[in-house]
């Protein structure tokens, strides 16, 4: 269900905060060690910070909705990039594991 906020001449959809996605990226960044996992972890933390900004700006009311939309957009971008790095780290870990098993 979508939430809407009144702004000037109409209603604007309340932006998503992507907090759960951010937390998942942080957890997977910790679990998938390596360079790519650490980058995913850092980006996940940045996305979580932007997610918190979304909530804070929504609470400001009408004047904060534009700031909330910008923070939401940045949180989504950080989460997309973090997910790519976490996936790369996961794939690299699988390849290393396969090579170790093959060389045994």
Image (spheres, rainbow, N blue to C red):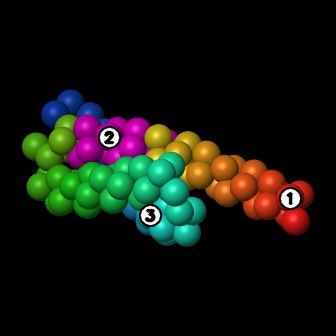
Residue occupied by mark 2 = 74
- What segment carries the magenta color? 68-80
> Which comes before the other along the chain, label 2 or label 1?
2
**Badge 3: few (under 14), some or many (20 or more) residues near its Cα, within 10 Å?**
many
The residue positioned 41% from the left and 39% from the top of the image is 77
> Which comes before the other along the chain, label 1 or label 3?
3
The residue positioned 16% from the left and 34% from the top of the image is 8
> Which comes before the other along the chain, label 2 or label 3?
3
Camera-near label (2 vs 3) is 3
> Which of the labelled discs sits on residue 26, or is there none?
3
> Which of the labelled discs sits on residue 103, or is there none?
1
Residue nearest the viewer, comparing 47 with 58: 47
Secondary element type, mark 1: helix
**Badge 2: few (under 14), some or many (20 or more) residues near its Cα, within 10 Å?**
some
The residue positioned 21% from the left and 30% from the top of the image is 9
In 3D space, how far apart are the residues under numbered discs 1 and 3 (Cα atoms)?
32 Å
Counting from the top left corner in percent of width and height, residue 51 is at 31, 56
């Amino acid at each position: 269900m979508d939430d809407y906020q009144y702004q000037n001449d109409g209603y604007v959809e309340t932006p998503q905060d992507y907090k759960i996605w951010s937390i998942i990226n942080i957890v997977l960044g910790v679990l998938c060690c390596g360079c790519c996992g650490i980058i995913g972890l850092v980006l996940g933390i940045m996305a979580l910070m932007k997610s918190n900004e979304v909530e804070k700006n929504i609470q400001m009311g009408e004047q904060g909705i534009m700031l909330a939309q910008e923070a939401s957009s940045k949180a989504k971008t950080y989460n997309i990039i973090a997910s790519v790095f976490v996936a790369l780290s996961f794939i690299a870990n699988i390849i290393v594991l396969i090579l170790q098993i093959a060389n045994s």
